[in-house]
Image (cartoon, rainbow, N blue to C red):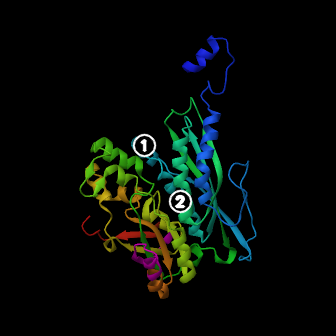
Amino acid sequence: MMNESARESVTEGAGATYAAAGVDIDAGDSAVELLKPHAARATRPEVVGGVGGFAGLFSLKLDRWKEPLLASSTDGVGTKIAVAKALDKHDTVGIDLVAMVVDDLVVTGAEPLFLQDYIAVGKVVPERIAAIVAGISEGCVQAGCALLGGETAEHPGLMGEHEYDISATGVGAVEAADVLGPERVRPGDVVIAMGSSGLHSNGYSLARHVLLDIARMPLDGHVEELGRTLGEELLEPTRIYAKDCLALVAEADVRTFAHITGGGLEANLERVLPDGLVAQLDRGTWTPAPVFAIISQRGRVERAEMEKTFNMGVGMVAVVSPEDVDRALAVLTARHVPAWVLGEVKPADGDASEGPRAVLSGDHPRF
């Protein structure tokens, strides 16, 4: 359907324009100028040139690797953006975006090198684009990677003026001989959990349904159990573990990592365990943050549903050799990452192909 400005341009005899159709090139140029300082923060020595070209350039003089492999990951933030939009606060979802991408890369042992973002909007609002990119830039700084460029696409008629979605692709590198994965895991290895900062960026469709639709809790309302407003809790940025994981690899014998995202702890840990072995995990080793209990109670969500939807307080898992457990915990503690022994890898009983490779048992204290 033709919008009013476009209809007027036709009825008055003027030729149709891109602006009348809903795409504002000048606003896009303004957004690029506003985001340039943010992008400049997130750089590395290997970056060649600056933001604004047709493509980003990154030198591959990876002298410290003998046989480097490139790793790549693409992801988005999902419906957490609906909370950002409702609160008109857009400077943290970019951190979430970076976390979702780089922490998938580091699971292989790869060091994140650079990231490129994609922002689709109904209408370019330069200040909002700059806020989103400010978050992406901050995430890249936390991850130690460069923001090499990206694309902002205006989609009038397809998206509402205040709607947007973001995604990104990241590239990392790892020495071929140092790739982490299931083939490194051995019986007796120890599973170490790293605490999450909250919901991170998964399960927001269920969380919003329970908290906003069923419980009718206002986003700007203070929640005593949380010690802040519901909106502040839901927009808490995802913890980025990339540098912490790389520091752990440098100091301890790490077999593999598992990034705990959609699917929960058991499903994501199973992805990095070989056939014939099972990780026995103990719920009694930690208490999930209050937000998880609120969702469970207000929505009468069963534990199994909670555990396959949310991270339940564990954002990343490391599987390490038993000899290096104390060293690994010391490294993470020194880096201010909440960490604890979650379980142990054991031989599977019977036919491993018919059973789960990661099993939670026990109960959370005070949950």
Q: Is residue 127 above or below residue 160?
A: below
Disc sitting over residue 139 in the figure: 2
Q: Is residue 156 above or below residue 311?
A: above
**Residue identified by numbered label 1:** 88
Q: Looking at the picture, tell me which residue is in the foreground, 12 or 249.
A: 12
Residue 218: percent from the left, percent from the top?
Answer: 29, 44
Q: Secondary structure at mark 1?
A: loop
Q: Looking at the picture, tell me which residue is in the foreground, 361 or 33.
A: 33
In the rendered structure, does residue 124 fall within the stretch colored magenta? no
Tell me where residue 88 sits by quadrant.
Answer: top left
Residue 192 visible in the current orientation: yes
Residue 356 visible in the current orientation: no
Q: Looking at the picture, tell me which residue is in the foreground, 22 or 67.
A: 22
Q: Residues within 10 Å of mark 1 (few under 14, many from 20)?
A: few
> Which residue sits furthest bottom?
323
In the rendered structure, does residue 344 fall within the stretch colored magenta? yes
Instruction: Compute the Cα span from label 1 to label 2.
Output: 20 Å
Tell me where residue 200 sits by quadrant.
Answer: bottom left
Q: Secondary structure at mark 2?
A: helix
Quadrant where the N terminus is found in the figure: top right
Q: Which residue is at 60% across, 36% downward?
A: 27
Q: Which residue is at 49% across, 86% downward?
A: 324
Q: Is residue 136 above or below residue 128?
A: below
Residue 49: percent from the left, percent from the top?
Answer: 73, 57
Q: Looking at the picture, tell me which residue is in the foreground, 249 or 358.
A: 249
User: Which span is picked out in magenta?
Assistant: 330-352
Quick one: label 1 or label 2, which is nearer the N terminus? 1
- Amino acid carrying label 1: it is Asp
Report the number of discs.
2
